[in-house]
Amino acid sequence: MSNRNTCMIFAHRGANREAADDCMEVEQRMEQLPRAMRGAIAENTRAAFNKALQYPIDGIETDVQLSLDEVPVLWHDWELDKLGHPGKCIDDFNFAQLEQMDFAGYNSPDALPEGALSLKEFIDSFRGRCGLNIELKSRDGESQQRLESKILKMLAIIGALAADGVFISSYSLPGLIFAHQHAPDLPLYYLLSGHHTQADIEGFLKDYSFLAGFCLPIDIHNESIAKLLQEQGKGVGVYTCNTVEDIQKALDLKVNILITDYPQLALQLRDS
Protein backbone atom coordinates (compact mmCIF):
# COMPACT_ATOMS: atom_id res chain seq x y z
CA MET A 1 0.00 0.00 0.00
CA SER A 2 2.87 2.42 0.67
CA ASN A 3 4.48 2.06 -2.75
CA ARG A 4 1.81 3.80 -4.79
CA ASN A 5 2.62 7.34 -5.93
CA THR A 6 -1.01 8.31 -6.48
CA CYS A 7 -3.37 8.79 -3.56
CA MET A 8 -5.89 5.96 -3.51
CA ILE A 9 -9.54 6.89 -2.93
CA PHE A 10 -11.45 4.49 -0.66
CA ALA A 11 -15.23 4.71 -0.31
CA HIS A 12 -16.11 4.80 3.41
CA ARG A 13 -18.48 1.87 4.04
CA GLY A 14 -19.38 2.05 0.36
CA ALA A 15 -20.83 5.03 -1.49
CA ASN A 16 -23.51 5.81 1.07
CA ARG A 17 -23.76 9.57 0.55
CA GLU A 18 -23.96 11.91 -2.41
CA ALA A 19 -22.71 15.49 -2.23
CA ALA A 20 -24.30 16.61 -5.48
CA ASP A 21 -25.26 15.46 -8.95
CA ASP A 22 -22.43 13.61 -10.67
CA CYS A 23 -22.28 16.04 -13.58
CA MET A 24 -21.50 19.12 -11.46
CA GLU A 25 -18.10 20.77 -11.62
CA VAL A 26 -15.81 20.84 -8.58
CA GLU A 27 -16.48 24.55 -8.02
CA GLN A 28 -20.22 23.91 -7.89
CA ARG A 29 -19.67 21.02 -5.49
CA MET A 30 -17.84 23.35 -3.14
CA GLU A 31 -20.99 25.41 -2.85
CA GLN A 32 -23.06 22.31 -2.19
CA LEU A 33 -20.93 20.76 0.56
CA PRO A 34 -21.87 23.06 3.47
CA ARG A 35 -25.46 21.86 3.21
CA ALA A 36 -26.50 19.17 5.66
CA MET A 37 -25.33 15.76 4.51
CA ARG A 38 -28.24 13.68 3.28
CA GLY A 39 -28.23 9.95 3.41
CA ALA A 40 -28.57 8.12 0.11
CA ILE A 41 -27.82 4.43 0.64
CA ALA A 42 -27.41 2.51 3.87
CA GLU A 43 -23.73 1.96 4.66
CA ASN A 44 -22.03 -1.44 4.52
CA THR A 45 -24.71 -2.86 2.23
CA ARG A 46 -24.47 -4.53 -1.15
CA ALA A 47 -26.15 -1.50 -2.69
CA ALA A 48 -23.59 0.89 -1.15
CA PHE A 49 -20.64 -1.17 -2.39
CA ASN A 50 -22.10 -1.60 -5.87
CA LYS A 51 -22.77 2.14 -6.02
CA ALA A 52 -19.16 2.86 -5.03
CA LEU A 53 -17.91 0.72 -7.87
CA GLN A 54 -19.78 2.87 -10.38
CA TYR A 55 -16.93 5.33 -9.78
CA PRO A 56 -13.28 4.59 -10.66
CA ILE A 57 -12.42 4.21 -6.96
CA ASP A 58 -9.34 2.41 -5.72
CA GLY A 59 -10.92 0.71 -2.73
CA ILE A 60 -13.70 0.21 -0.20
CA GLU A 61 -13.57 0.47 3.59
CA THR A 62 -15.85 -1.69 5.73
CA ASP A 63 -16.28 -2.92 9.33
CA VAL A 64 -16.43 -6.45 10.71
CA GLN A 65 -18.10 -7.73 13.87
CA LEU A 66 -19.05 -11.23 15.02
CA SER A 67 -22.55 -12.67 15.28
CA LEU A 68 -23.68 -14.76 18.25
CA ASP A 69 -22.73 -17.93 16.38
CA GLU A 70 -19.39 -16.37 15.39
CA VAL A 71 -19.99 -15.46 11.76
CA PRO A 72 -18.03 -12.34 10.68
CA VAL A 73 -20.65 -9.76 9.66
CA LEU A 74 -20.37 -6.24 8.22
CA TRP A 75 -21.74 -3.58 10.58
CA HIS A 76 -20.25 -0.40 12.04
CA ASP A 77 -22.35 0.68 15.04
CA TRP A 78 -22.07 -1.15 18.33
CA GLU A 79 -25.84 -1.41 18.62
CA LEU A 80 -28.71 -2.14 16.25
CA ASP A 81 -30.88 0.85 17.15
CA LYS A 82 -31.16 1.81 13.46
CA LEU A 83 -32.77 -1.54 12.74
CA GLY A 84 -35.34 -1.24 15.50
CA HIS A 85 -33.45 -3.23 18.15
CA PRO A 86 -32.39 -0.59 20.70
CA GLY A 87 -29.64 -1.72 23.05
CA LYS A 88 -29.08 -4.94 21.10
CA CYS A 89 -25.80 -5.72 19.33
CA ILE A 90 -24.74 -7.88 16.41
CA ASP A 91 -23.56 -10.57 18.81
CA ASP A 92 -27.01 -10.80 20.43
CA PHE A 93 -28.27 -12.55 17.28
CA ASN A 94 -27.10 -15.50 15.24
CA PHE A 95 -26.39 -15.03 11.56
CA ALA A 96 -29.64 -16.64 10.41
CA GLN A 97 -31.57 -14.07 12.47
CA LEU A 98 -29.46 -11.20 11.11
CA GLU A 99 -30.17 -12.36 7.57
CA GLN A 100 -33.89 -11.84 8.24
CA MET A 101 -33.42 -8.22 9.31
CA ASP A 102 -33.44 -5.31 6.84
CA PHE A 103 -30.05 -3.60 6.93
CA ALA A 104 -30.91 -1.26 4.05
CA GLY A 105 -34.34 0.19 4.78
CA TYR A 106 -33.47 2.45 7.74
CA ASN A 107 -31.83 5.00 5.44
CA SER A 108 -34.45 5.03 2.72
CA PRO A 109 -37.98 3.57 2.66
CA ASP A 110 -37.52 2.91 -1.06
CA ALA A 111 -34.40 0.78 -0.67
CA LEU A 112 -34.58 -2.88 -1.55
CA PRO A 113 -34.44 -4.95 1.68
CA GLU A 114 -31.06 -6.49 2.46
CA GLY A 115 -30.19 -9.00 5.13
CA ALA A 116 -26.86 -8.95 6.94
CA LEU A 117 -23.81 -9.15 4.68
CA SER A 118 -21.19 -11.65 5.79
CA LEU A 119 -17.49 -11.02 5.37
CA LYS A 120 -17.26 -14.13 3.22
CA GLU A 121 -19.89 -12.86 0.77
CA PHE A 122 -18.23 -9.45 0.72
CA ILE A 123 -14.80 -10.93 -0.05
CA ASP A 124 -16.23 -13.29 -2.67
CA SER A 125 -18.15 -10.45 -4.34
CA PHE A 126 -15.66 -7.58 -4.28
CA ARG A 127 -12.16 -8.99 -3.98
CA GLY A 128 -10.17 -8.28 -7.12
CA ARG A 129 -12.51 -5.48 -8.18
CA CYS A 130 -10.80 -2.92 -5.94
CA GLY A 131 -8.72 -2.71 -2.77
CA LEU A 132 -10.47 -3.73 0.46
CA ASN A 133 -9.82 -2.10 3.84
CA ILE A 134 -11.39 -4.37 6.43
CA GLU A 135 -11.67 -2.79 9.87
CA LEU A 136 -11.59 -5.22 12.78
CA LYS A 137 -14.10 -3.88 15.32
CA SER A 138 -13.42 -4.50 19.01
CA ARG A 139 -15.51 -2.89 21.73
CA ASP A 140 -14.75 -2.37 25.41
CA GLY A 141 -15.47 -5.45 27.48
CA GLU A 142 -15.01 -7.92 24.64
CA SER A 143 -13.23 -11.01 25.88
CA GLN A 144 -9.79 -11.87 24.54
CA GLN A 145 -11.11 -15.26 23.48
CA ARG A 146 -13.85 -13.71 21.36
CA LEU A 147 -11.49 -11.16 19.84
CA GLU A 148 -9.04 -13.89 18.88
CA SER A 149 -11.83 -16.07 17.49
CA LYS A 150 -13.03 -13.17 15.35
CA ILE A 151 -9.52 -12.58 14.00
CA LEU A 152 -8.93 -16.23 13.19
CA LYS A 153 -12.24 -16.45 11.33
CA MET A 154 -11.42 -13.25 9.42
CA LEU A 155 -8.00 -14.58 8.47
CA ALA A 156 -9.50 -17.87 7.31
CA ILE A 157 -11.71 -15.91 4.90
CA ILE A 158 -9.17 -13.30 3.80
CA GLY A 159 -6.10 -15.50 3.69
CA ALA A 160 -2.72 -14.92 5.27
CA LEU A 161 -1.10 -12.90 2.49
CA ALA A 162 -3.76 -10.82 0.73
CA ALA A 163 -1.28 -9.47 -1.80
CA ASP A 164 -4.20 -8.37 -3.98
CA GLY A 165 -4.96 -5.17 -2.09
CA VAL A 166 -6.78 -6.52 0.96
CA PHE A 167 -5.63 -5.30 4.36
CA ILE A 168 -6.88 -5.11 7.94
CA SER A 169 -7.09 -1.98 10.07
CA SER A 170 -8.12 -1.67 13.70
CA TYR A 171 -8.10 0.54 16.78
CA SER A 172 -7.25 -2.63 18.71
CA LEU A 173 -3.49 -2.93 18.98
CA PRO A 174 -3.75 -6.31 20.79
CA GLY A 175 -5.92 -7.48 17.90
CA LEU A 176 -3.34 -6.42 15.33
CA ILE A 177 -0.54 -8.07 17.30
CA PHE A 178 -2.52 -11.34 17.39
CA ALA A 179 -3.30 -11.08 13.68
CA HIS A 180 0.38 -10.56 12.87
CA GLN A 181 1.32 -13.65 14.87
CA HIS A 182 -0.99 -15.77 12.70
CA ALA A 183 -0.55 -13.96 9.38
CA PRO A 184 2.86 -12.24 9.39
CA ASP A 185 2.65 -11.24 5.72
CA LEU A 186 -0.81 -9.65 5.87
CA PRO A 187 -0.73 -5.81 5.76
CA LEU A 188 -2.00 -4.38 9.05
CA TYR A 189 -2.79 -0.72 9.71
CA TYR A 190 -3.17 0.77 13.18
CA LEU A 191 -6.11 3.17 13.41
CA LEU A 192 -5.24 6.22 15.48
CA SER A 193 -7.60 8.61 17.28
CA GLY A 194 -7.61 12.36 17.61
CA HIS A 195 -5.68 12.34 20.88
CA HIS A 196 -2.62 10.63 19.41
CA THR A 197 0.52 12.69 18.85
CA GLN A 198 3.66 12.35 16.76
CA ALA A 199 5.46 11.14 19.89
CA ASP A 200 2.91 8.33 20.16
CA ILE A 201 3.50 7.38 16.53
CA GLU A 202 7.27 7.33 17.09
CA GLY A 203 6.72 4.93 19.97
CA PHE A 204 4.48 2.67 17.89
CA LEU A 205 7.08 2.62 15.12
CA LYS A 206 9.72 1.50 17.60
CA ASP A 207 7.64 -1.15 19.36
CA TYR A 208 5.50 -2.49 16.53
CA SER A 209 7.62 -2.42 13.41
CA PHE A 210 5.45 -5.10 11.79
CA LEU A 211 2.73 -2.53 11.09
CA ALA A 212 2.38 -1.75 7.39
CA GLY A 213 1.10 1.70 8.19
CA PHE A 214 -1.20 3.97 10.13
CA CYS A 215 -4.63 5.38 9.46
CA LEU A 216 -5.27 8.63 11.29
CA PRO A 217 -7.87 11.40 11.45
CA ILE A 218 -7.19 14.04 8.85
CA ASP A 219 -7.37 16.66 11.64
CA ILE A 220 -4.14 15.46 13.28
CA HIS A 221 -2.16 14.71 10.14
CA ASN A 222 0.58 17.19 9.27
CA GLU A 223 3.80 17.57 7.30
CA SER A 224 5.98 16.38 10.17
CA ILE A 225 4.05 13.13 10.62
CA ALA A 226 3.95 12.65 6.85
CA LYS A 227 7.74 12.98 6.65
CA LEU A 228 8.27 10.62 9.59
CA LEU A 229 6.11 7.86 8.13
CA GLN A 230 7.55 8.30 4.66
CA GLU A 231 11.08 7.95 6.03
CA GLN A 232 10.02 4.77 7.84
CA GLY A 233 8.46 3.34 4.68
CA LYS A 234 5.01 3.14 6.25
CA GLY A 235 1.70 3.58 4.48
CA VAL A 236 -0.50 6.51 5.49
CA GLY A 237 -4.28 6.52 5.41
CA VAL A 238 -6.53 9.36 6.56
CA TYR A 239 -10.20 9.43 7.53
CA THR A 240 -12.88 10.69 7.03
CA CYS A 241 -12.28 13.38 4.39
CA ASN A 242 -15.70 14.81 3.56
CA THR A 243 -15.01 18.46 2.75
CA VAL A 244 -13.06 20.05 -0.05
CA GLU A 245 -10.59 21.40 2.51
CA ASP A 246 -9.95 18.01 4.12
CA ILE A 247 -9.64 16.22 0.79
CA GLN A 248 -7.20 18.84 -0.51
CA LYS A 249 -5.17 18.65 2.70
CA ALA A 250 -4.84 14.89 2.31
CA LEU A 251 -3.79 15.29 -1.32
CA ASP A 252 -1.25 17.98 -0.44
CA LEU A 253 0.26 15.72 2.23
CA LYS A 254 0.50 12.92 -0.36
CA VAL A 255 -1.29 10.29 1.70
CA ASN A 256 -1.48 6.78 0.28
CA ILE A 257 -5.14 6.20 1.18
CA LEU A 258 -7.92 8.78 1.45
CA ILE A 259 -11.14 7.48 3.04
CA THR A 260 -14.26 9.47 2.24
CA ASP A 261 -18.05 9.36 2.17
CA TYR A 262 -17.87 11.31 -1.10
CA PRO A 263 -15.61 9.31 -3.43
CA GLN A 264 -16.90 11.10 -6.51
CA LEU A 265 -15.76 14.46 -5.12
CA ALA A 266 -12.38 13.10 -3.97
CA LEU A 267 -11.78 11.59 -7.40
CA GLN A 268 -12.54 14.88 -9.13
CA LEU A 269 -10.23 16.82 -6.85
CA ARG A 270 -7.44 14.25 -7.14
CA ASP A 271 -7.61 14.03 -10.89
CA SER A 272 -8.27 17.70 -11.71
Image (tube, rainbow, N blue to C red):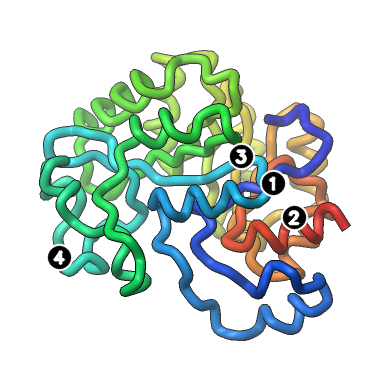
Which residue has dot 2 on it?
A: 267
Position of 110 with respect to 222 (left or right) is left
Q: Which badge, 2 or 4, comes first in the chain's sequence?
A: 4
Q: Residue at x 36, y 54 (%)?
A: 76
Using the image as rendered, state which of residue 178 and residue 120 is in the foreground: 120
Q: Residue at x 53, y 20 (%)?
A: 162
Q: Which badge, 2 or 3, comes first in the chain's sequence?
A: 3
Q: Which badge, 3 or 1, comes first in the chain's sequence?
A: 1
User: What residue type is disc 1 on?
Assistant: Pro
Q: Residue at x 79, y 34 (%)?
A: 230
Query: Where residue 229 appears, x then y in whole percent?
Result: 74, 36
- Disc 3 vs disc 1: which is toward the camera? 1
From this view, report whether residue 152 is shown above or below residue 111.
above
Q: Which badge, 4 or 1, comes first in the chain's sequence?
A: 1
User: What residue type is disc 4 on?
Assistant: His
Q: Secondary structure at mark 3?
A: strand
Q: CA distance from mark 3 to mark 1?
A: 24 Å
Which residue has dot 1 on it?
A: 56
